[in-house]
Image: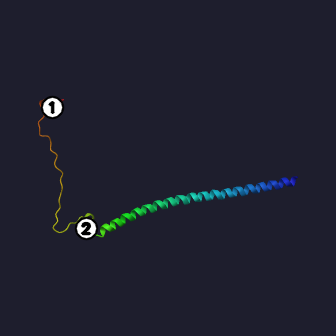
Amino acid sequence: MHTKQIRQGIFISITLLVSFWLLSLIWGLVGKAQVAVREAHNAERQYQTLEKRKQMLEANLVVLATDRGRDAVIRTTFGVARPGEEVIVVVSPATTAPTSTPSWWQKIVSWF
């Protein structure tokens, strides 16, 4: 009977070792899967950002394909004008101060 207990002990020990080994492998796979999912989300965000940038650049190319678009971009980028054009400065209207004289009551109150 003594040998039977030794065999059972060895079998249980080997089973436990194999179980722990398999659990460590599964734990490693779960960690790698989490990293892969995170990287996939990062790649998707980068792709969306690049798609938006591509659409913006394509819209800019459409504008630059016309003479008027090129002219506008050159004017705004370099601040140039065509020969004979003049600068127009728009000034907001001056604020006017009230011209009425304060009443005798307002003069007395302002002293205090």
Residue 56 falls left or right of residue 23: left
Above/below status of 12 relative to 69: above
Q: x, y percentage for residue 26? A: 65, 57
Write the residue at 83% across / 56% down.
7
The residue that label 1 is drawn on is 106
Nearer to me, 4 or 49? 49
The residue that label 2 is drawn on is 68
Above/below status of 15 relative to 110: below
Which quadrant of the structure image shows residue 84? bottom left
Nearer to me, 93 or 44? 44
Residue 8 falls left or right of residue 45: right
Write the residue at 80% across / 53% down.
9
Mark 2 neighbour density, 10 Å: few (under 14) some (14–19) many (20 or more): few
Sequence-wise, the earlier of marks 1 and 2 is: 2
Which kind of residue does numbered mark 2 sit on?
Arg
Under circle 1, the secondary element is: helix
> Any mark on residue 62, and which?
none
Write the residue at 17% across / 46% down.
95
Q: x, y percentage for residue 52? A: 40, 62
Which quadrant of the structure image shows residue 86? bottom left
Above/below status of 7 relative to 63: above
Above/below status of 44 relative to 108: below
Which kind of residue does numbered mark 1 sit on?
Gln
